[in-house]
Amino acid sequence: METPTIHTERLLLRPFVRSDASDVFAYASNPRVSRFTSWSTHATIADSEAFIDMVLARGPEEHTWAILPARDSRVCGAIELGPVTEVEAEIHYVLAEPFWNRGLMTEAARAVLAWGLATYPAVTRVVSRAFVDNVASHRVMEHCGMRFERVRRDHMAKLGESVEQLEYALTRAPAAT
């Protein structure tokens, strides 16, 4: 299934295109942005091009959107939703620092969650994780109706060690058959 374009009050969420690389580099090269991500800070535009190539090569059930302010043509972040199993999906996101603390990521995540739950009726659980210190991400998940479930220790390749992450989930009753 093709990743659709989603409009919200203040945002445009659309599939990435290769020409977005310089915009991705603008936020992904900021160590404050990448600090709480699974990926390393982008050192060159080639890192951002590789990210976009990876996104474009994903399967039809893995959806990644470029986040753009509604009145701007520059990408300021990314959000993705994809299945883990037939009944569980994961959501992940990142936003450029100048756009923090405006409720934009919550707006994007709510729109993607609504789309995902409508598109995949068998999905009964959507999960996300954030580093223990990433309080802003915890708030996004909570504002989207996700509830804290547990602390996980996951190996973080970019750090070469295990880190504690808080796992949140949004659950719903299985679809009627």
Image (tube, rainbow, N blue to C red):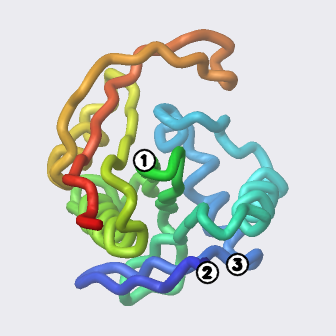
> Taking 51 as reference, is 135 above or below it?
above
How crowded pointer 1 is (Cα within 10 Å; few <14, some 14-19, many 20+) is rated as some
Residue 115: name its quadrant: bottom left
Residue 70 position (above or below residue 108): below
Q: Which residue is mark 1?
A: 88
Secondary structure under the numbered disc 1 in the rendered image: strand
In primary-sequence order, the first of circles 1 and 2 is: 2
Which residue position is annotated with label 3? Answer: 17
Residue beneath the point at 38% across and 56% down: 123
In this view, the mark in front (1 or 2) = 1
Q: Which residue is mark 2?
A: 2
Between 110 and 89, the one lying in front of the other is: 89
Expressed as whole percent of the image width and height from the top left, the position of residue 102 reads: 22, 61
Could you say where residue 139 lies in the image, as x and y percent from the top left? 20, 42
* Residue at mark 1 to residue at mark 2: CA–CA distance: 19 Å
Q: Residues within 10 Å of mark 3 (few under 14, many from 20)?
A: some
Q: Position of residue 83 (x, y in %)?
A: 52, 53
Residue at point 20%, 53% (across, down)? 173
- Looking at marks 1 and 3 on the same chain, the residue that comes earlier in the sequence is marked by 3
Viewer-side residue, 136 vs 138: 138
Please state if 74 lies on the left or on the right of 47 as rendered. Answer: left
